[in-house]
Image (cartoon, grey):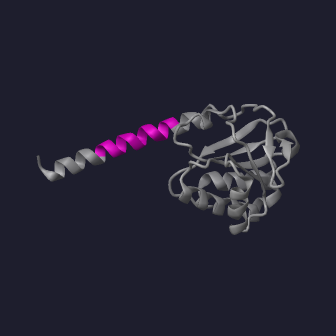
Amino acid sequence: MDKNIVDLRSDLYDCEYNNNRNKEKYNQCLFSENINISDVYLVDPKYDSISLSKVINNTKLIYRFFGSSCVQCIEDELDIAKQLADSIGANNIVIISDYNNINMLSAIIKRKNITSSYFIFNKKFELLIEDDEQAIPSFFLLDANLRTRFVFKTGGHQNIADPYYRRIIWFFKNGF
């Protein structure tokens, strides 16, 4: 078989896979929107347990990632979170990971010079975006009633100028 045909078939398969994966991510985001999540307990940098409702006293942008997430993706998205903090305030961002050890998360946060709050939660939230074997990080707003809004599964090449992040900045600057 001609090498060009093999390459074209491979490209077509990749395109089809990416299209199906994007549809799946879209559906996960859509069905994670406007969901009330349970009040759970997080672990803070001092190893103290604190309820999510105590942390979320007003609407916050949550960056949620997993120990099994792509390391480069986490690095890039933490850079975006830091840039967002310059626009919306570090106090409006909460970082939550499922790391087993808070010291691992603290090391990354300190190395990145991030001043936002961060916590560990070793379980899953009741959101379809977390029901994914690929452990893709996400951003979403969480209000004081623990209701989600603007759910976004990350992935791919992103930057602060992307529409999602512009929308988050607009939300915090305009209050809705």
Name the residue: 77% across, 35% down: 147
Helix, strand or loop: magenta stretch:
helix
* Residue at (75, 50) in percent of width and height: 171
The answer to whether any part of residue 170 appears in the image is: yes
* Residue 20 located within the stretch drawn in magenta: yes
Residue 12 percent coordinates (x, y) = 29, 44
Q: Residue at 72% of width from left, 31% of height from top?
A: 35
Q: Tell me, yes or no, whether the highlighted magenta stretch contains residue 123.
A: no
From this view, report whether residue 91 is shown above or below residue 133.
Answer: below
What is the x, y in percent for residue 11? 29, 48
**Farthest-out residue, left:** 1
Query: In this rendering, would 6 be left or right of 118?
Result: left
Q: Which residues are magenta?
A: 12-24
Q: Nearer the viewer, residue 50 or 153?
A: 50
* 39 sits to left or right of 134: right
Residue at (59, 61) in percent of width and height: 76
- Seen from the viewer's position, the closer of residues 151 and 65 is 65
Across and down, in percent, residue 102 comes to 74, 53
